[in-house]
Amino acid sequence: MTNHLAPFARLSRRVLRTLAAGVLGLAALQAWADDAAGLQAKYTELREPLAKNSYQRALYIDSAEAGDNLKGDVYAVLDHPFSKVGGALKDPADWCQIMILPFNTKYCHAVEGGTLLVRIGRKFDQPVEDAYKLQFALRNVASTPDFFESRLNAASGPLGTRDYRIVVSAVPLDGGKTFMHLSYSYGYGTAGRIAMRGYLATVGADKVGFSMAGTDANGRPQYIGGVRGAVERNAMRYYLAIDAYLDAPQPQQAERRIQNWFNATERYPRQLREMDKPTYVAMKRTEVERQQTMIQ
């Protein structure tokens, strides 16, 4: 192994997989500042790709890489009224019901002051004490009759990652629907870059995102890979978690949310399949129960 890869050799497979899952960053690129007029204009711009695509739903995904920063964007038409969407994304406890659904979130607990205590890991049987700690601050930026925005931020994470951010904004549409923009982004340092490169050269080599990178000689779609593919996969996971929560927002509906999230990911097995359904459901039942208890 060459000298410049020596640090990578000392990184565990758990660290590599965790980085690849996107858990080491939920922000860093400056998110595009939405407002009601801008988001409505974006909906008009994307009307055709939202209506005609391979996602089996009104959805558009994009990503960007700039230096040590990555950003994934999901634009979607939700089959829920604007008032319901805004009301469901204001409270830290509600956000924890969303955050717990992706397979790599092992714990989420809301505490006083709009803070979410999150543990991120990877393995089905991983002890929560071994998962990475992240602390998100929830800020409700805007809530008017025609525009909503909520932000989750964390300043730092493992292996030099920084500026975690999930931004959700929305505007009402006709017919009781809502147009939503989810922006997911993060920044990383040298250790994170080395780990990600190692993952993409080994266990993550065949992983792809959702954006089309072109077609092969037979005209079949070729999807974007690498770090942009990774950030797109994670943006999609959080979008599907929001949608699953909106379908079943009551505290007693946790089982329905678990089932809905997994079923939605199975529409995109090449990108999102990480485990079978019985394994995921058993894991999430335990983790949803555990998040009721405060863990330091």
Image: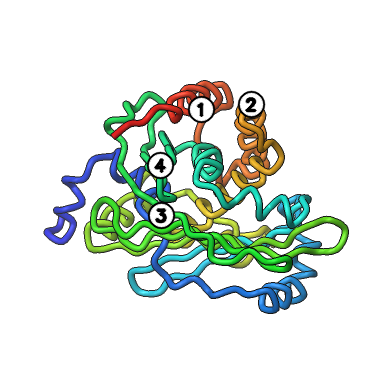
Instruction: Give the mark nearer the N terminus: 3 vs 1.
Output: 3
Q: Which residue is mark 1?
A: 284
Query: Which labelled disc corresponds to residue 111?
Result: 4
Q: Are marks 1 and 4 in contact (CB under 8 Å)?
A: no
- As drawn, the label of residue 137 is 3
Q: Earlier in the sequence, mark 2 or mark 3?
A: 3
Residue 217 in sight from this viewpoint: no
Question: Which of the two discs, 4 and 2, labels the residue nearer the N terminus?
Answer: 4
Amino acid tagged 1 = Lys
Name the amino acid type tagged 3.
Ala
Picture colour scheme: rainbow
**How many angstroms separate mark 1 from mark 4 (CA)?**
21 Å
Is 54 on the left-hand or right-hand side of 169?
Answer: right
Q: Secondary structure at mark 3?
A: strand
- How far apart marks 4 and 2 lie (CA) works out to 20 Å
The CA span between labels 4 and 3 is: 10 Å
Q: CA distance from mark 3 to mark 1?
A: 23 Å
Mark 4 vs 3, N-terminal side: 4
Mark 1 or mark 2: whose residue is earlier in sequence: 2
- For disc 2, the marked residue is 252
Q: Nearer the viewer, mark 4 or mark 3?
A: 4
Q: Nearer the viewer, mark 1 or mark 4?
A: 4
Label 3 vs label 1, nearer the camera: 3
Q: Residues within 10 Å of mark 1 (few under 14, many from 20)?
A: many
Give SS at disc 4. Answer: strand
Q: Residues within 10 Å of mark 2 (few under 14, many from 20)?
A: few
Q: Nearer the viewer, residue 97 or 69?
A: 97
Q: Give the residue at x 73% y 68%.
A: 146
| Label 1 secondary element | helix
**Tag nearer the camera, 4 or 2:** 4
Amino acid type at circle 2 is: Gln
Q: Looking at the image, is 21 positioned above or below residue 180?
A: above
